[in-house]
Amino acid sequence: MRLRFSRGVITIAIIVVVLAVGVSAGLYWVFKKVPQLAAPQDAFCSVTTPDGVRSLLPEQAQIAATIAAVAARRRLPERAVVIAYATAMQESKIQNLDWGDRDSVGVFQQRESQGWGSKKQLMDPVYATNKFFAALVKVKNYRKIPLAEAAQAVQRSAGGYAYAPHETEAKILAAAFTGRVPKAVHCWYPSDSTPVPRPRTAEARKQLARAMGSTTITTKKRGWLVAAWSVAHAETYALRKVDYDGATWVNDLETDGWQQGGSAGARKVDLA
């Protein structure tokens, strides 16, 4: 048996659908164009490369940037960074944890009882990363063997197979934070405090040098590594603008990543 509807009922149904679509579109436009009317937002970071897009917490972005900087100091290949990222994803979700299994702590969940260092040292991402890489480079053919095998040789974890699923995401992050893919790292943080804090550019450069050693820019890839590190640490050092190689990043919620412009050339990353 077929149901029959009057023209009036059909007309009302069409009007309801049109109104619903209109309201939805209107709300989308309002929240897109007037973000302050939307729910309050927390700081965030994102990575965009030809192979994919990933969202990160600011702490994760800062640690990822630090790992890439330490690798640059040690002149390690991108493969080493990929292995480090996959390991950190599995062990701590790229967070500097002060707890773990037994006495495991830090980004790589290293243990004082196994000779990695003191808890205070292992809670320092620069120190922890250096210890990880020092062990990794001793693994025979670490560049060529499967990622899980290389990571397991360093970590000696009970579940070494668990590192492998993180390889794809680790490659995306490595392409961005090593500087191989320009303009790949974008962050935003709330900056409505009064008075507006002054950018601590000197402190930022000092901490970058602690991880990276020389911060002299000899190649564009190295320059984009410095730029990515600076954006990832923008909230920590109250940075509102980063310029490099004809592009600029600003701490603006409506600005989607890097834009053309800025006064910096290819030999210097400007912070403000």
Image (cartoon, grey):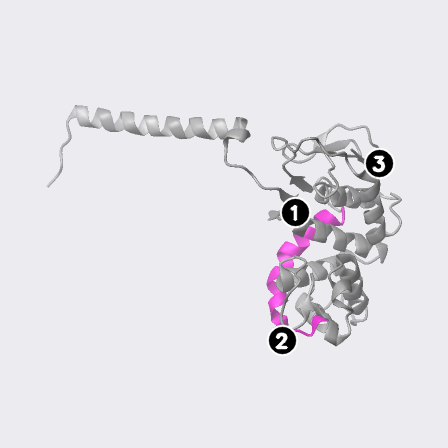
Q: Is residue 173 magenta?
A: yes
Q: Which residue is mark 2?
A: 158
Q: Quadrant of the N terminus?
A: top left
Mark 2 burial class by Cα count in 10 Å: few <14, some 14-19, many 20+: few
Identity of the residue drawn at 78% across and 42% down: 224
Q: Is residue 146 visible?
A: no
**Could you tell me what secondary structure mostly forms the magenta stretch?**
helix
Q: Which residue is mark 1?
A: 58
Identity of the residue drawn at 85% across and 55% down: 73
Identity of the residue drawn at 78% across and 74% down: 115
* Amino acid type of the residue tagged 2 in the rendering: Ala
Q: Nearer the N terminus, badge 1 or badge 3?
A: 1
Q: Which residue is mark 3?
A: 266
Q: Which residues are magenta?
A: 155-179
Q: Position of residue 186 (x, y in %)?
A: 67, 40
Residue 55 vs residue 113: left or right?
left
Between 249 and 171, the one lying in front of the other is 249
Find the distance from the CA under tag 1 to the CA under tag 3: 26 Å
